[in-house]
Image (tube, rainbow, N blue to C red):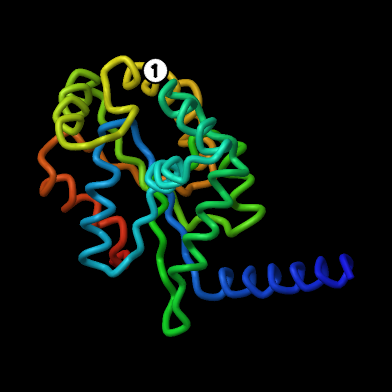
């Protein structure tokens, strides 16, 4: 009986994977904390009909469930530490499956993930390779701190404070920049300097999703 149930789960998993391969495209959206990944993803979602999936938001929703695992996630987020790749990938996969439609190929903007090379490799080996990485770079750290302070006035995020932000910046430099380099060597990075106003940045961001012109 147990073997039969396991076989059913394996068959269902295979069907889900076939659905993902056929009807899903994935773009990773990366950049330092406060660079505007969520804001720009929302604008792309509104214009192009993409699905914005925030890895951080999925984790924060998981924390609300008040389980033993959610308490561990909450503490890691407070400390600016990375969440185990298996947890984040599982949540991302669930969200993708919930939002796939049979009518067309759906583009998913996965915001804030992967934050380490092994996270990206794990996601791509268990779900699907990304089309490319949208890299929103904002070199001025002080400007990012100001953005975080403004966001903290409105949000309830446990990591929206200067101390946590500085830890996240250090983590970003240590772990996430190598991810950019990793995908850059594959020719899969489209970089946008995100140090101006939202609309100006978006005009550059949207160009990354338009068909390339052939001279």
Residue located at (30% from left, 39% from top): 136
* Quarter occupied by residue 107: bottom left
Residue linked to disc 1: 167
| Residue 28 in the image, given as x and y percentages of width and height | 43, 49
Relative height, residue 186 to residue 168 (above, below): below
Relative height, residue 104 to residue 187 (above, below): below
The answer to whether residue 89 is left or right of residue 63 is right
The answer to whether residue 189 is left or right of residue 124 is left
Relative height, residue 20 to residue 62 (above, below): below
Relative height, residue 40 to residue 47 (above, below): above
Give whichever of 190, 161 is nearer the camera: 161
The answer to whether residue 201 is left or right of residue 119 is left
Which quarter of the rendered picture does the N terminus lie within? Answer: bottom right
The 10 Å Cα crowd at callout 1, few under 14, some 14 to 19, many 20 or more, is some
Residue located at (33% from left, 29% from top): 158
Q: Secondary structure at mark 1?
A: helix
Residue located at (70% from left, 70% from top): 14
| Residue 112 in the image, given as x and y percentages of width and height | 40, 41
């Amino acid at each position: 009986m147990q073997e039969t149930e396991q076989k059913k789960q394996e068959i269902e998993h295979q069907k889900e994977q076939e659905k993902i391969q056929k009807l899903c495209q994935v773009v990773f959206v990366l950049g330092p904390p406060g660079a505007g990944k969520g804001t720009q993803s929302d604008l792309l979602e509104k214009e192009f009909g993409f699905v914005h999936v925030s890895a951080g938001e999925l984790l924060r929703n998981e924390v609300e469930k008040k389980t033993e695992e959610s308490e561990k996630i909450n503490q890691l987020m407070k400390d600016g530490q990375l969440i185990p790749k298996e947890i984040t990938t599982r949540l991302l996969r669930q969200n993708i499956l919930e939002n796939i439609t049979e009518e067309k190929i759906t583009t998913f903007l996965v915001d804030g993930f992967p934050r380490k090379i092994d996270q990206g490799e794990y996601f791509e080996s268990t779900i699907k390779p990304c089309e490319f990485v949208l890299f929103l770079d904002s070199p001025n750290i002080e400007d990012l701190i100001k953005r975080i302070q403004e966001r903290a006035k409105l949000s309830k995020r446990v990591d929206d404070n200067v101390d946590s932000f500085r830890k996240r910046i250090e983590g970003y430099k240590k772990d996430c920049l190598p991810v950019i380099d990793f995908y850059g060597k594959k020719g899969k990075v489209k970089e946008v300097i995100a140090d101006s106003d939202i609309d100006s940045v978006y005009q550059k961001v949207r160009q990354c999703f338009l068909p390339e012109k052939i001279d």
